[in-house]
Amino acid sequence: MLFPGSSGRYAQRLALALLLGTWSSLAQAAATEGEIKAAYLYKLASFVRWPEGVDSSSKFTICVASRGDVARLLEKLADGQQVGGRAVMVEQLTSAQAARVKECQLLFVGRGNADALFKAAHGLPVLTVGDRNSGARGGVVDFLFRDGRVRLVIDRGAADTQHLELSSKLLDVAVTVTP
Amino acid sequence: MNLPLLQRFSRQLFERRWITGVIALLLLLVSLLLGWQWEQRENANQVRQVTVQARILAGSVAGALAFDDYQTASEYLMALRVNRNIEAAGVYNGNGNLVAGFAKPGEKVPRHAVRTAPRIEGADLVVVEPVQQAKLELGTVYLRAIVEPLTARLSRYVAIGTILLLAALLIAVLGASNAAAAAANRQLLEQIAAREMAETALRQAQKMEALGQLTGGVAHDFNNLLMAASSGLELMQRAKEQTRRDKLSQGIRDALDRGAQITQQLLAFSRRTPLNSEVLQLDEHIDKLASLLDHSLRENVSVRFAFPPDLWPVEVDVSQFDVAILNLAVNAKDAMPRGGRICITAANRPNALDGADAVEIAVEDEGIGMSPEATEKAFEPFFTTKEVGRGTGLGLSQVYGFVQAAGGTVSIASEPGKGTTITLLLPRSLPQTETAAESPLDEKPPSLKGLSILLVEDDPNLNELVGQMLEEQGTEVLAARNAAEGLALFESHAVDAALSDMVMPGEMGGLDLARRMRALRSDFPIVLMTGYSAAAGPAAAEGFTVLRKPFTMAALASTLEASLRDRAG
C-alpha cells in the first residue's frame, strides 16, 4: 500500500523532502489567527457527516460565541456557499443563549467557559468546537496552538455523543485523538 | 463445393510469385498495425495507472491541505517515492502554491499549480488531479511518471519483429521457389504434349509410308497380273489352234489365281478375312508340312521338325498356317544362299499369352541374319531385304496377319551373321469342338439339278455371271438386285436355297436378309458371298455359310451342296 493510515512510519523519509515546511509556515504566517480559525471552521464541515433526517432545516447554521471577528470572517467566507446542499448561515451567540444551540449544526465557542453551551448541545447533532488556549476547552474539535500553528484536538467520544461521523482524513491531521 | 476453389486458389498462389510477396507484406503490415494498437492500449493503461495514483494521493492529502498540515501531506507524498516510475510529485493548496513536493535528481516540480488533462511531456506522463472534500476545492496534486521510452519498447519488440520478418521472408522465398517449380512443371508438360504430338505425327507418317508401299506393291503386282491376263486374252482371240488356246487360257487362270492369292494375303494382313478356323493337332500335321516344304526349298537346305507328341491343339485357319510356315521357310532358305538347316520346333507354353496357355512354334535358320533396323520393319507389308524380283515383301506380313487373326503373337530375334529365329505363339484350343471334324464325308452330295435358287447380287455383271454359273449346275435361278427384292421373291416363290451378296445398297444388307429369311424358314439353306467384309465374321458366328469371293464354279457348287445337305440332315 502506498498510503498507509499511520503517518509515523514515514517519519524518516521526511528528511528526504526537498521542498517542505518553509512554504507551509509562510502560508500560515500570512493569515491572522482569526482568519485561520474561520477558514478551519468552514472547512471542518466537509470532514463531518451529520445524521440524516434529524433536522429538516434548509440551512446549515454555524453558531459562533464570543468571537465576533471570527463570525464576521466566516460570514464573508461562507457567503453563497453550501454545505451538504444547504446554504451556510452564520449566527452569533452569547453564553446565555444556550436555548438556541439546537438550531446550530456547528457551534464554536471562542473564549471563556464553553461548558454551558456545550452542555446545552450535549446529545444533539451539533459539531462542537472549542479553543483551549483561550479557555474554551472541550468540544468534538478543540483548537490548539502549538509550534506557531493552529492544530486540532479531536474527541471521538464526544463525536459519538453528538451522533457525528468524522472523516478519517480529519483524524489524520489531529494532534491528539481522545478516544 | 469450396474445395476446387481452394485448390485453384492455392495453385494460383504458388504459381504467381507476386502473390506470395503481397502476402508476406500483408503479414508485416498487420503485425505493425497490431503492434501500434498494442502501444496505444499500453499508453492508455499507463495514463490510467498514474491517474489512479494521483487520485489516491489527492484523497489522502485532503485533510492535510484543509488544515495546513503540510507535514502530513509531505508524508503521503513521500510514500510515492517507492514507485520508481514517478519522477516528480507535488501537492498545492487552494491558492495554487506548492506545499509539499519531491523530484528525482535532474527533475523539477512546478512552483505553482497547473490545470491540465493528462499529457505526455517528452518521455514523461503528467497527471494533475484536484483535491476535493465534499465538493470543497482544497488544492491539487501533480504527478510526473516515466512512460517507457520508445527505444526501450522498440527493443522489446525487436525479437518478435525479427521472427516475424524471417517468417515473411520464408513465405516469400517458398512462394518464389514454388512458382519456379510450377513454371518448370508447366514447361515440362508442354514439352511432353509437344513430343506426343510429334510422335503421333511420326506414326501417322510411318503409316502413310507403309500404306504407300503397300498400294505401290499391290499396284505393281496387279499390273503384272493384268498385263499377263490381258495379253493372254488378246493372244487367245488370235490363236487358232485349240491346244494353244487352252494353254493361254491356263496362263490367264494362273494369273487370276495369283491375284486372288495376293488379295487373300492382304486381307489376312488387314485381319478382315473370315477365318476358316479348325482345330489342328500340329504333330499330326508334320507330314503335310514336310511335303509342302520339300517342293519349295532347294536341295542344299534341310528341314528338321521337332514337335513333341503331347502338343496342345491350336485353332487356326490351316491353309493360312501352311502359308505362314512356308513363307517363314522360304525366308530362311533365302537367308542361307549356301545352304543350311532350318529347325522348326514346337512346344507347349503355359500362361504365355496374357495368362492363357499357348503353343510356341519357332522357325530358326543359320543364315545371314538381319540388322536391328530391318528387324523393326520386317512385318511391314512390301518391306523386303531381297533384291528386286525375288520377293513381294508380303511374306512376313502374311505371317503377322495370320497370327493376329488367330489371337497370337509373333516375335523376331536376329543378329547379322548369327541367323534368325521367328517365334509364333498361338493360343491353345480348348477341347470342345472336336466333333467339328466329324462330317459325313462319304455321304453323297445331293445334286443341285432342278432346284430353284434365289440369287441376290447388286453388281449386274456378277449377278449375270453367277446366275449363269448356277444355271450351268442345272438350277433354276431367281435373280434379285437388292435385299428387299430378294425378300419379296422369297415370300412369293417356293425356293430351295438362297445365295446372297453381303454388302448391298439399300436399308437391308445381305446379313439382314439372311436373318429375315431364317426367321421365316428356320431350316432354309442360305449362303452369303463376300470378298471383303467386316460382317463376314459375325455372319459366320451366326451360323451362316460364308463363300469367299472370288470363287470357282466348283466351290460354288460344293458350298451350296454342303449347305443343302446340312439343312436336310
Image: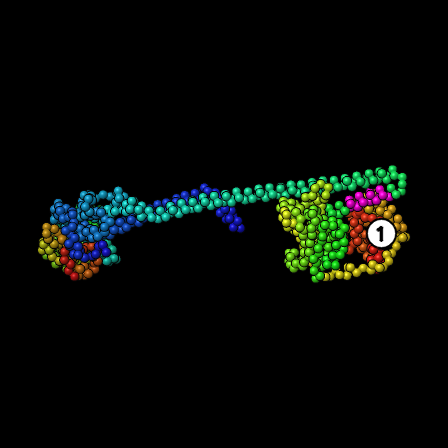
Residue drawn 69% across and 52% down? B341
Residue to which mark 1 is pinned = B557
Quarter of the image containing the C terminus of chain B? bottom right
Q: Residue at x 20, y 53 (%)?
A: B79
List x then y, in percent, for residue B217: 72, 41
| Helix, strand or loop for disc 1 | helix
The reply to whether the magenta stretch includes residue B377 is no
Q: Is residue B280 visible?
A: no
Identify whether B561 is placed above or below A26: below
Amino acid type at mark 1: Ala
What percent of the width, then of the height, locates residue A30? 12, 45
Task: Answer yes or no: is residue A163 visible.
Answer: yes
Q: Give the quarter of the image for residue B199.
A: top right
**Residue placed at 84% from the left, 59% from the top?**
B442
Q: Nearer the viewer, residue B259 or A61?
A: B259
Nearest to the observer: residue B123 or residue A135: B123
Q: Nearer the viewer, residue B310 or B96?
A: B310
**Magenta region includes residue B256:** yes
Q: Which segment is the magenta one? A: B246-260
Examine the residues drawn in magenta and state their main secondary structure. Answer: helix
Using residue B544 as the reference point, say whether residue B38 is left or right of it: left
User: At 75% across and 47% down in the image, what residue appears?
Assistant: B264
Q: In the figure, is residue B563 to the left or right of A14?
A: right
A73 or A170, nearer to the observer: A170
**How many circles with numbers are drawn on the protein?**
1
- Find residue A137 and report its image quarter: bottom left
**Residue B234 placement, left or right of A61:** right
- Residue B524: x and y in percent read 83, 55
What is the x, y in percent for residue B211? Answer: 69, 42
* Classed neighbour count for the residue bearing mark 1: other residues with Cα under 10 Å, few (<14), some (14–19), many (≥20): some
